[in-house]
Image (cartoon, grey):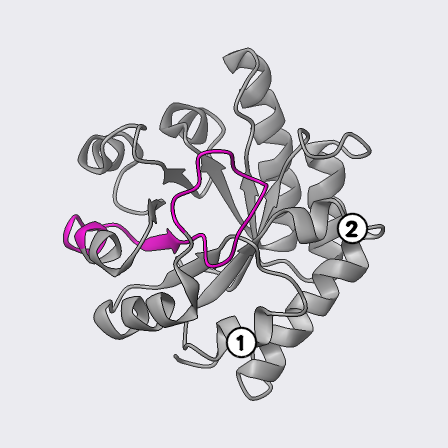
Amino acid sequence: MKIGRLHVITDTTLQQRFSHLDLARLTLEGGADTIQYRQKTGATRLRIQEAIELRALCRKKRVVLIVNDRADIALAADADGVHLGADDLPPLIARDLLGPVRLIGGSADDAEEAAALERAGLDYAGIGPIFATQSKSNAGPVLGLAGLEQAVERCRMPLIAIGGITLQNVEAVLRTGVHGVAILSAVVCADDPTVATRAFAEAIVAARGGSADSPR
């Protein structure tokens, strides 16, 4: 399964105008190729149902659905994968639970952590924060573009840059050679999430010489 280049993380904490499903619809229309469902609280049964609805929408669009943190919800909803944080299920156990086909990603603060995730057999790593961000209260130290370049040079697996990425700095992020970007507040808090997503999608295509799927 291919790792997407434009991950949109749904969220109903930073904004309350749109549900997770609303955000998925709007951002898929704008060109997101991966939806990450991020819901930290609430009954597990309700979160499974929400993930199932997202899965149905993403399957229609042939877009990957990743569940943040919860491998059990990813399995129950038949999502395409899970993104694990440092305090979540260990990757080897998640692999046993989800099988060989579903994607397993993890979070890395720097090149060293990204390399460790690669050795652990993960499919991709979300790395950052690249810039200062208010979207995550426990985000680590800012990595910066130089730190991101070091990680790209060191790792063969796809790296997805995250943290403080905006339309003003995404071009510089992509010039590091990183596989893709994950966007949260710059899309979900935008006046029009579809327009914002489309602008990021166009930036990725332009940075890759006219193709979103050009090899790194």
**Which numbered disc, 2 or 1, marks the residue that appears first in the sequence?**
1
Q: Which mark is residue 90?
A: none
User: What span is colored magenta in the figure?
Assistant: 116-141
* Residue 145, above or below 42: below
Q: Is residue 79 visible?
A: yes
Which residue does the numbered mark 2 point to in the structure image? 190
* Residue 6, above or below 71: below
Q: Amino acid at mark 2?
A: Ala
- Residue 163 coordinates in the image, percent (x, y): 51, 52
Q: Which residue is at the front of the view, 212 or 62?
A: 212
- Provide the secondary structure element on which disc 1 rests: helix
Q: Which residue is at the front of the view, 152 or 195?
A: 152
Residues packed near mark 2 inside 10 Å, few (<14), some (14 to 19) or many (20 plus): some
Viewer-nearest of discs 2 and 1: 1
Looking at the image, which residue sits at the far right? 191
- Residue 165 coordinates in the image, percent (x, y): 58, 59
- Residue 149 coordinates in the image, percent (x, y): 35, 73
User: In the visual, does 208 lie left or right of 142?
Assistant: right
Residue at horizontal 52 percent and vertical 38 percent from the top: 136
- Report the quarter where the N terminus lies: bottom left
Q: Is residue 2 visible?
A: no
Q: Amino acid at mark 1?
A: Ala
Residue at horizontal 76 percent and vertical 38 percent from the top: 22
- Provide the secondary structure element on which disc 2 rests: loop
Magenta stretch secondary structure, dominant: loop
* Residue 68, above or below 166: above
Labels in figure, total: 2
Please tell me whether residue 77 belongs to the stretch shown in magenta. Answer: no
Which residue does the numbered mark 1 point to in the structure image? 172
